[in-house]
Image: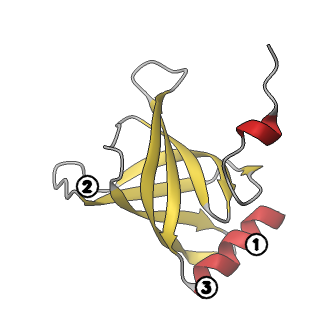
Amino acid sequence: MMLNRKIDERRSSERVAWQGQVQILPLIPFHPVLGLQQVRAQDLSESGLQVQSERALPLKSTVLVEMQAFNHPTGIQVIGSVIWISPAAAEHEWCLGIEFCDVGESARHGIRTLLKD
């Protein structure tokens, strides 16, 4: 059965495939053992991104997200919340849906630039 993408799509912003470098740091609930972790981005929109990670984070976890981009040498930083978790195709890996909660103007501009590239 074929899924209708327009019906299934829950994002308010258009998403694009983007395999950039991303780091996430759990903030709430605080996980000192987890610390900063490298994850692989799968797609990106103005309102969030999907990443693949070796660790699952609890739903509603607040995370600091830092995306690496050529035009932003210090990275693009936003605060997000884990809104869904799903097993990835690779064994012992997870897909995480992160919705952006706090995005500054500089970060928003950087994300829009990434979406155009």
Tell me the residue at 81%/41% (across/down).
6
Name which of mark 2 and mark 1 comes first in the sequence: 2
Mark identifier at residue 106: 3
Tell me the residue at 58%/76% (across/down).
73
Instruction: Place residue 107 in its image quadrant.
Output: bottom right
- Residue 1 at x, y = what percent? 79, 13
**Residue type at mark 1?**
Thr
- Residue 66 at x, y = what percent? 48, 65
Callout 1 secondary element: helix
**Residue type at mark 2?**
Gly
Name which of mark 3 and mark 2 comes first in the sequence: 2
Callout 2 secondary element: loop
Horizontal side of 117 relative to 32 (left or right) equals: right
Tell me the residue at 16%/49% (across/down).
33
Camera-nearest residue between 75 and 83: 83
The residues tagged by marks 2 and 1 sit, at their Cα atoms, a distance apart of 28 Å
The residues tagged by marks 3 and 1 sit, at their Cα atoms, a distance apart of 11 Å
Name which of mark 3 and mark 1 comes first in the sequence: 3
Write down the residue under mark 2: 35
Camera-nearest residue between 100 and 70: 100
Circle 2 Cα neighbour tier, 10 Å, few/some/many (<14 / 14–19 / ≥20) = few
Q: Are marks 3 and 1 in contact (CB under 8 Å)?
A: no
Tell me the residue at 45%/36% (across/down).
85
Horizontal side of 33 relative to 53 (left or right) equals: left
Horizontal side of 9 relative to 24 (left or right) equals: right
Q: Is residue 2 above or below residue 53?
A: above
- Residue 51 at x, y = what percent? 53, 44
Across the whole image, how many numbered discs are drawn on residues? 3
Write down the residue under mark 1: 113
